[in-house]
Image (spheres, rainbow, N blue to C red):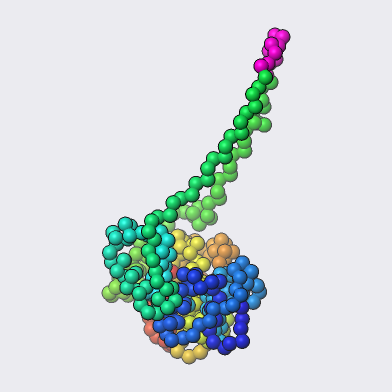
Amino acid sequence: MMCDWLGLVLDAGHSGNKNAFKALIAAEYCGVKVLLSKNFEMGVSNKTPEFIKMNPLGKIPVLETPDGAVFESNAIARYADIVMTCTLYSGFAWILNKDFTSEFPHVERYFWTMVNQPNFKKIIGDVKQAKAVPAIRRNAAPAKPKEAKKAAPKEAKKKAPKETPKPVAEASEEEAPKPKPKNPLDLLPPSKMVLDDWKRLYSNTKRNFHEVAVKGFWNMYDPEGYSLWFCEYKYQEENTVSYVTMNKVGGFLQRMDLCRKYAFGKMLVIGSELPFKLKGLWLFRGQEISKFVMDEVYDMELYEWTKVDISDKAQKQRVNAMIEDLEPFEGQALLDAKCFT
């Protein structure tokens, strides 16, 4: 997997992987040489301690660089048109025939314009659209074995019919399936704050953000049903490469998807000098961070978590600054800001 060449190496399994296309096409546009790792075997190479150290999820692709590894295909590429086209590629090539895509002429024009660019064609070659939707394979029902002809039974002597014992009800009843346990957060008393309303306000406010969105947040906020938390990365000294640092944030937010129904978050990458600082603000349902989040999202233990005291004016102002990406933040420039909605 690792090689002696000091350039960029992509661990991707095989060159036909659409997620590998994203990185390779981006490299062509940037004029950067990327080598595909040799003898990479999915299910084997990605389970080694060496690979897990680069990507704890054990997934591909992973880009090995002299400054460290970058995982998640979108983070490696960082180009919107490349990511979108590679996502559409499998559909056009295998499922979406002309009869279907003709109803979406703008998508068609966009896709064929992109895949016919020289840098795309160098990696994925000539794309041919699916001719027909693949048939769904159905397994044929197994043939019933022919029953052997039964000999005519001899007339038996008539006997008094034996009384069939009544089955014991408890023994015959099948055990009812146990209901799936509810998330503890769903058992909390109803909150006057509707999280989706806040997320819509945040996403749709384009002007006068402080007056509309920030003040709107405090009008909606329910301190009994929700709690606010600051987080700070424990190992800031590691953050010496900008894109690796931002990739940490992207991976963290992807793994938080399981609590999207119960949370809102802002993550900031701060500083114009090394090391970069990772700090965040999170709104969680309930008065504590739920155990299921702490157990399922391993990134949580990489951060120090401090509950916000909204009666403290300074802490409340810090919340405001993080919601609206106020710059400079604590005297430093913002390199990046990401939102979990």
Residue 306 appears in view: no
Residue 11: within the magenta?
no
Q: Can residue 151 be seen in this view?
A: yes
- Looking at the image, which residue is at 54% across and 78% down? 36
x 61%, y 70%: residue: 41
Q: Where is residue 113 in the image (x, y as percent from the top left)?
A: 32, 73
Q: In which quarter of the image is residue 134?
A: bottom left
Q: Which residue is drawn at 50% across and 46% down?
A: 138
Q: What stretch is highlighted in magenta?
A: 152-164
Which residue is depicted at the point 54% across and 64% down? 293
Q: From the viewer's perspective, tell me whether residue 219 is left or right of residue 44.
A: left
Q: Using the image as rendered, state which of residue 62 and residue 294 is in the foreground.
A: 62
Left or right: 237 as drawn, with respect to 315: right
Q: Main secondary structure of the magenta part?
A: loop
Q: Where is residue 278 in the image (x, y as percent from the top left)?
A: 50, 80
81 or 151, which is in the foreground? 151
Quadrant of the rendered structure where residue 220 is? bottom left
* The N terminus: image quadrant: bottom right
